[in-house]
Image (cartoon, rainbow, N blue to C red):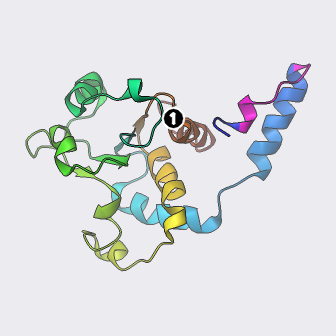
Amino acid sequence: YLGQIARSIAFDSREKDLEFKQILRDHIHLKTEIMQYAAMVIEILGAFNFAAFHIRRNELQYKYVFAEASESFSNVRPLLAANEAIYIATDEKNDKFFKVFEENGQRKVYRWRDFFGEQAQFEQTKNVQIPSKLHGEIEMVICAMGRIFFGTKESTFSQYIGVLRGYLKAPYT
């Protein structure tokens, strides 16, 4: 299904609705290992010390939400702190697509591969082997720990990052 389960069920009273959502919040959790892997990246970037983006480019069925990088960046630029690092969760394959976010080398932009895999830049994460089925959930947690988060409209991935930000008491939620 598409969408969040908490938004898919209707109750006849607000009290029942809140009770159901509290059960989900209190008893349905991401696996501990997901949080531990995400914590490796957060330790490097700093909790709530970077801007996070989810930019879906390839497999999203709602093509009308796609925007060029320059348009996306100009829309959010006023909300970024000076020289604030950026973490981008994306399925975009073209490395040049996000060049505008670097502001001519004045801003550091990170993606998954900067922390894990052959191109990893950090000693503490470069030899860590992570099951590929966990990558998405780990990136959700990383994005949720940003000072500010910008998501992709119509994306359930972005929507859940917003939910996590609420649970984590993130700023600008």
Residue located 33% across and 65% down the image:
115
- Dot 1 falls on a residue whose secondary structure is loop
In the displayed structure image, the side of residue 120 where residue 13 appears, left or right: right
Measuring from the top left, give residue 162's x and y in whole percent: 55, 36
What's the residue type where badge 1 is placed?
Ser
Measuring from the top left, give residue 54's x and y in whole percent: 40, 41
Pointer 1 residue: 155
Nearest the eye: 128 or 59: 59
Nearest the eye: 63 or 154: 63
Residue located 63% across and 66% down the image:
32
Q: Give neighbour class at mark 1: few <14, some 14-19, many 20+ (Cα, 10 Å).
A: some
Highlighted magenta segment, given as a residue range: 5-13
Magenta residues, dominant SS class: loop
Residue at far bottom of view? 127
Q: Is residue 135 above or below residue 155?
A: below
Indicate yes or no whether the magenta region holds residue 173: no
Q: Is residue 161 above or below residue 35?
A: above
Q: Is residue 128 above or below residue 134?
A: below
In the displayed structure image, the side of residue 133 where residue 83 appears, left or right: left
Indicate yes or no whether the magenta region holds residue 9: yes
Q: Quadrant of residue 33?
A: bottom right
